[in-house]
Image (cartoon, grey):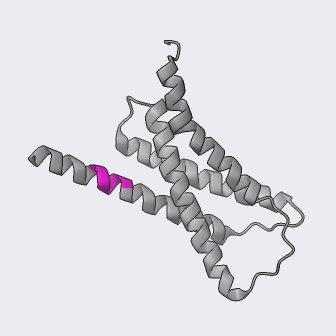
């Protein structure tokens, strides 16, 4: 294995570090004690927030995986990024179940996974569209 060059270090900072920091922020926000009671109309917004947050996570994880696993096919990287995002969502819910002031919800994890799937699909369609248009000029 070759040692990382300074450009590899810069690439790590631009591609991998954002994904790691974002996961840390998600867990930090998911660990905050809140004494607010959530009105029913905000519950739907909570799921939308989960959907969007884990969609963004999927894109960040995909960027990190593309940097680290250059030889892998884009389709496999997309599947891996969706899977990792879903697992991180499940781990967040498991973590919250251990906190006395938080609750774990399966529906939050479902929203996380659906957001990951949608962004993964969008990434796949983008690559497919670009390949077709580059091939046809």
Q: How many marks?
A: 0
Residue 67 drawn above or below residue 82:
above
Relative horizontal placement of residue 73, taking residue 7 as reference (left or right): left
Res. 110 visible in picture: no
Res. 73 visible in picture: yes
Relative horizontal placement of residue 100, taking residue 133 as reference (left or right): right
Identify the residue at image location x=38%, y=29%. 71
Between 30 and 100, the one lying in front of the other is 30
What main secondary structure does the magenta stretch of the protein show?
helix
Relative horizontal placement of residue 131, taking residue 127 as reference (left or right): left
Identify the residue at image location x=81%, y=61%. 32
Identify the residue at image location x=30%, y=54%. 126
Relative horizontal placement of residue 2, taking residue 20 as reference (left or right): left
Q: Position of residue 79 (x, y in %)?
A: 44, 48
Q: Position of residue 111 (x, y in %)?
A: 58, 68
Between 98 and 9, the one lying in front of the other is 9
Q: Using the rendered view, name the quadrant where residue 47 is placed.
A: bottom right
- Which portion, as a residue range, is magenta? 123-127
> What residue occupies the far left of the structure in this picture?
136
- Report if residue 124 lies within the magenta region: yes
Q: Position of residue 87 (x, y in %)?
A: 61, 51
> What residue occupies the far bottom of the structure in this picture?
40
Q: Using the rendered view, name the quadrant where residue 45 is placed.
A: bottom right
Identify the residue at image location x=76%, y=54%. 28
Residue 39 drawn above or below residue 114:
below
> What residue occupies the far top of the structure in this picture?
2
Q: Position of residue 90 (x, y in %)?
A: 66, 57
- Report if residue 113 lies within the magenta region: no
């Amino acid at each position: 294995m070759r040692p990382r060059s300074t450009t590899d270090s810069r690439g790590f900072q631009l591609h991998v570090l954002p994904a790691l920091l974002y996961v840390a922020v998600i867990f930090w926000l998911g660990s905050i004690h809140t004494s607010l009671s959530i009105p029913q109309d905000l519950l739907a917004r909570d799921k939308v927030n989960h959907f969007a947050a884990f969609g963004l996570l999927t894109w960040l994880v995909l960027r990190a995986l593309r940097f680290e696993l250059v030889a892998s096919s884009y389709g496999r990287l997309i599947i891996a990024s969706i899977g990792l995002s879903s697992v991180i969502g499940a781990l967040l819910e498991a973590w919250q179940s251990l906190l006395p002031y938080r609750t774990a919800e399966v529906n939050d994890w479902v929203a996380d996974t659906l957001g990951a799937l949608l962004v993964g699909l969008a990434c796949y369609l983008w690559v497919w569209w670009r390949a077709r248009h580059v091939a046809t000029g």
